[in-house]
Amino acid sequence: MKLFVLLFITILLLQGFAEALSLGNAPDSLTSIDEGGDKLALHKKHHPRKINCSYACSRRCRKASRKKVCSRACKTCCMRCNCVPPGTYGNKSACPCYASLKTHGHKPKCP
Ligand SMILES: *[C@@H]1O[C@H](CO)[C@@H](O)[C@H](O)[C@H]1NC(C)=O
Ligand SMILES: *[C@@H]1O[C@H](CO)[C@@H](O)[C@H](O)[C@H]1NC(C)=O
């Protein structure tokens, strides 16, 4: 009988110990999951990095005859596509989204 009680107490103690361990571990594992999530979120935010549309479009439009018109269209396209082709004209295959945007008149929208 005494042995049984002793065993019971030992089991209780062990359970308490295990619980304490898992409780002690829980914050750790949570933080490591959080860190992973943060890294993933950062990575997600980081990967389609926003380009500097003002900069890209002033470069794109620096030789345009109507700079303001060019810049305005370019910025709209840039914000939608997050891409501006290199050079001052053409090269649109570098930005398929940019190349595919059309005006209401079905003309290429982006300079
Ligand atoms: C974009 O580039 C211009 C010129 O380099 C700079 O002045 C401006 O701060 C940049 N904007 C952003 C949002 O990085
Ligand atoms: C196309 O882009 C390249 C750089 O990638 C540039 O040297 C070339 O001048 C561009 N073409 C035009 C027509 O601007």
Image (cartoon, rainbow, N blue to C red):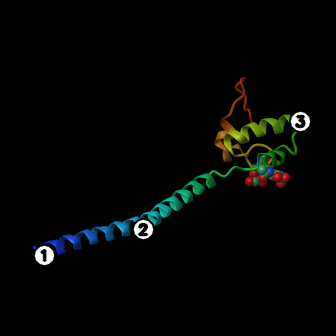
Disc 1 to disc 2: CB gap under 8 Å: no
Residue position for label 3: 66
Decide: few, some or many residues near mark 2? Use Cα within 10 Å; few <14, some 14-19, many ≥20. Answer: few
Q: Taking 22 as reference, is 75 above or below it?
A: above
Q: Is residue 13 left or right of residue 93?
A: left
* Amino acid type at image mark 2: Gly
Q: Element under label 1?
A: helix
Pointer 3 local density, CA inside 10 Å: few below 14, some 14–19, many at least 20? few
List x then y, in percent, for residue 4: 13, 72
Q: Which residue is mark 2?
A: 24
Q: Amino acid at mark 3?
A: Arg
Give me the residue at 84% from left, 43% from top.
61
Q: Quadrant of residue 66?
A: top right
Measuring from the top left, give residue 38's x and y in whole percent: 56, 57
Q: Nearer the viewer, mark 1 or mark 2?
A: 1
Location of the N terminus by quadrant is bottom left
| Quadrant in which the C terminus is drawn | top right
- Closest to the camera, between mark 2 and mark 3, is 2
Q: Is residue 111 visible?
A: no
Q: Nearer the viewer, residue 34 or 21?
A: 21
Question: How many residues crowd around disc 1 within 10 Å: few (fewer than 14), some, or many (20 or more)?
Answer: few
Report the side of 8 relative to 57 (left or right): left
Label 2 CB, ligand 1: below 8 Å?
Answer: no
Q: Which residue is mark 1?
A: 2
Of the two numbered discs 3 and 1 on the same chain, state the one appearing first in sequence. Answer: 1
Say which of 87 and 82 sits in front. 82
Cα gap from disc 1 to disc 2, whole angstroms: 32 Å
**Earlier residue among tags 1 and 2:** 1
Label 3 secondary element: loop
Check the image and report above or below for 78 versus 44: above
Distance CA(mark 2)–CA(mark 3): 66 Å
Q: Can residue 12 be seen in the rendering of this structure?
A: yes
